[in-house]
Amino acid sequence: MRRKAIHWCNARELEKPKEEGGFGFKNFHLFNLVLIGKQVWRLFDNPDALWTKLLKGLYFPNYELFSATKGRKSSWVWNGLCEAKEHMKSGLLRGIMSGEDSWFHCDPWLPSIPCYNLSHLGLEPSKVSDWIDRDSRSWKMDAIQNLVPDEIAQAIARVPIGPCTAKDSWIWRLTKSGGYSVKSAYRMFRENRDSNPVIDLSASSRPNRDDWKWLWDLKLPPKLHFFIWTCSTNAIATRVRLFDRKCAPNPLCPLCEDQVETIMHCFFRCSKALETWYRLGLLNVLPVADSCFVDWFFGLKDRVSVGQITKIVCSLWNIWIARNGWVFEVREFSPPSVAILAERDVMNVQEARIGSSAQSSSSPAGLPSQLGSSRSSTLSPPGPFSKVVHCDGSFVSDAQMATYGIAIANSHGQVIDGKAERFFCSSPLQGEAFAILNAVIWARPRILSQRVSVLIVRD
Ligand SMILES: [Zn+2]
């Protein structure tokens, strides 16, 4: 590992789920606490179990588990349980049944107020049951209204009261069942930790959940996903960012040395980049003067097709690669070459997309079925000829890709040779024409070597 690597992004940002702009990395410390929390939940859920009584006798004989503390000579096991319990507190709620096991003034039993308990009011200690009318099983609202502010009295009135014979119990308020779950606890622990987020001045605009989902759902190679993510979070090493971090002598663009190299200059304003977009025929999708990268890129989802998004992402990527080629290897930034490389990348991405869809479907997309099982299949009899070349092409308009297949059949119509290929083209007609041309070129030496003077191509 390089010691002096630059940290472009806060680790906490990476721990956010993908739909919130992170990568969903787990924080080991938090996750460990969540797992310990399962044991703490068992203590809460089984107050009469032997090991709960054992721990109570050792560490909190005079307290409830909820308010128990580490103490001075506690074991590392108890320390771990206490740490997890502190994190769990905002997810715990008392379910009121008889009310005799819950403290009115300090237990978290009020789901509709922000801190769930009344400890901020400094009330005298009392049990919840003291405020319940035993006969009618309803709240003593007159007394409560004299004790607490109106909005809290209303919140109390909304709390359902269980049967007087049942014991109060703990509820994990983040699940429908009321039981503890690792997933809900991890999310809560992480959100609580991030409730005072590090202010990221570098990102003026942040994508929302829908934006991130759209990005991750795009069928792109991981490196392009990651590249767009770095651009969207401003975690990309433009000169202005390097200058901010005192890693560059000036913030000027290394290509034109005329303007500050912001992310927008690098990709859209610099003359070399602009010429690349021109050669790709994409000038119409470029951002307007004062927009930022995030607003522009995620605004594209309602404006352009998936095919065009692929082309735009590949173009951005190749502009960045060419810019780095100039910076690190003094390799000329040639807009025509960059445009060709971007087009090639678009083809590769679309080819991979077709390949994956063909793998998932039962019959390969665009491949003639005769080629798929050449040993057993037969084609139509060749008539008066000893061998006939069959060819066909198919076209996928979304991906702008065509596939052609060529098969040579013998006098019995059995396939004796064949090939299939995918290629990039713009129309079905072009695909068909290309298929026939290739059939002639490929089959001619194979047929003519066997003294056949006529080559008939059947489509
Ligand atoms: Zn420039």
Image (cartoon, helix red, strand yellow):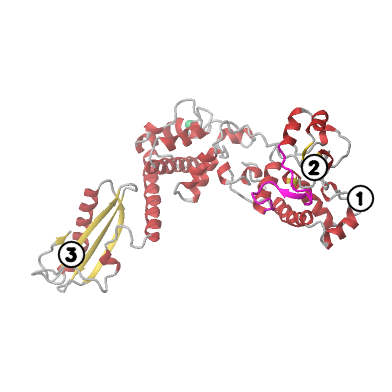
Residue underneath mark 1: 62
Q: Assign a secondary structure to mark 1.
A: loop
Residue underneath mark 2: 135
Nearer to the camera, 266 or 139: 139
Circle number at residue 389 = 3
Q: Position of residue 39 (x, y in %)?
A: 76, 57
Distance of mark 2 from mark 1, alpha carbons?
A: 32 Å
Name the side, left or right, on which 97 lies relative to 442: right
Look at label 2 and name its amino acid: Asp
Q: Residue at x 48, y 39 (%)?
A: 323
Labels 3, 2: front one: 2
Name the side, left or right, on which 85 lies relative to 17: right
Q: Residue at x 22, y 58 (%)?
A: 392
Q: Assign a secondary structure to mark 2.
A: loop
Nearer to the camera, 243 or 15: 15
Was residue 160 drawn as part of the magenta stretch in this picture?
yes
Look at label 1 and name its amino acid: Asn
User: Magenta span covers which residues?
Assistant: 158-181
Residues packed near mark 1 inside 10 Å, few (<14), some (14 to 19) or many (20 plus):
few
Q: Which of marks 1 and 3 is nearer the N terminus?
A: 1
Q: Which residue is drawn at 71% across and 53% down?
A: 34
Name the side, left or right, on which 276 lies relative to 242: left
